[in-house]
Image (cartoon, rainbow, N blue to C red):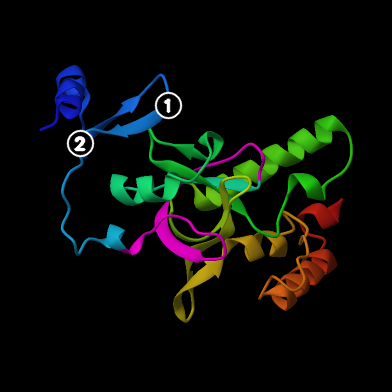
């Protein structure tokens, strides 16, 4: 064992968790000291450091809806894949203490979809947060992550399992938000493979006067 590692172990041994590290309150980051060895066949081997232009699909649990009402915080149970993913994110897009990362949902922005007085906009934001919390809070999800290097954040699509008369299926939460009138579809022609689906969902929400279309 090197002198540096010996000093680290001596100074923070009581703080080490089962993964061989500890959360540093001063820097608000997780520090590895003596990483726990893993079986090479574990699921984290499929996770790699974020790369621009490449999409990763991860599983996790939604812990909360962000105040910007277009982001969700996702908890990754295993420390190792969390650290691999979070290593490239800015401090505002990760929380090492709770192993949660922020996903900015593509093509939607509830706050940017509504006008009116400040009071009305705040009421709308609270409504959207309550609605999304009721639908997603503490639920297992799948997320498609696209890494944005300049802002050091993830943007992408959230999926959840829903029951239908034909059995369970994966539901695109971003698309569902547009269907429910929780947001306009912020068009990204040429980049979204579901452009027609989003436009159709928005037309139906508008016709039914759901959410933003009611006002």
Depth check, front residue: 68 or 137: 68
117 in the magenta segment: no
Q: Is residue 136 visible?
A: yes
Q: Given the current orientation, which residue lies at the most extreme left position? A: 1
Q: Given the current orientation, which residue lies at the most extreme bottom position? A: 166
Q: Given the current orientation, which residue lies at the most extreme right position? A: 116
Gap between marks 2 and 1, in whole Å?
17 Å
Which stretch appears magenta? 46-69
Quarter of the image for residue 205 reads bottom right
Quarter of the image for residue 47 reads bottom left
Residue named by callout 2: 20
Q: Position of residue 94 (x, y in %)?
A: 48, 39
The residue positioned 17% from the left and 53% from the top of the image is 38
Figure quadrant of the N terminus: top left
The residue positioned 76% from the left and 34% from the top of the image is 122
Which disc, if any, is residue 97? none
Is 44 positioned to the left or the right of 26 in the image? left
Residue named by callout 1: 28
Depth check, front residue: 204 or 154: 154
């Amino acid at each position: 064992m090197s002198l540096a590692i010996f000093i680290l172990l001596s100074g923070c041994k009581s703080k080490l968790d089962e993964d061989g590290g500890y959360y540093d309150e001063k820097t608000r980051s997780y520090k590895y000291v003596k990483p726990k060895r893993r079986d090479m066949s574990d699921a984290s081997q499929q996770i790699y450091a974020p790369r621009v232009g490449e999409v990763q699909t991860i599983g996790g649990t939604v812990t909360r809806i962000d105040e910007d009402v277009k982001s969700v915080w996702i908890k990754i149970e295993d420390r190792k894949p969390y650290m691999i993913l979070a290593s490239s994110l800015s401090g505002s897009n990760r929380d090492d203490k709770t192993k949660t990362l922020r996903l900015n949902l593509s093509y939607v922005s509830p706050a940017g979809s509504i006008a009116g007085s400040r009071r009305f906009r705040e009421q709308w934001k609270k409504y959207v947060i309550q609605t999304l919390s009721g639908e997603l809070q503490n639920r297992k999800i799948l997320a498609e992550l696209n890494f944005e290097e300049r802002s050091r954040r993830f943007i992408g699509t959230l999926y959840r399992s829903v029951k239908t008369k034909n059995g369970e299926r994966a539901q695109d939460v971003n698309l569902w938000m547009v269907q429910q009138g929780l947001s306009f579809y912020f068009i990204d022609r040429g980049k979204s493979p579901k452009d027609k689906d989003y436009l159709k969902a928005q037309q139906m929400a508008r016709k039914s006067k759901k959410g933003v279309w009611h006002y």
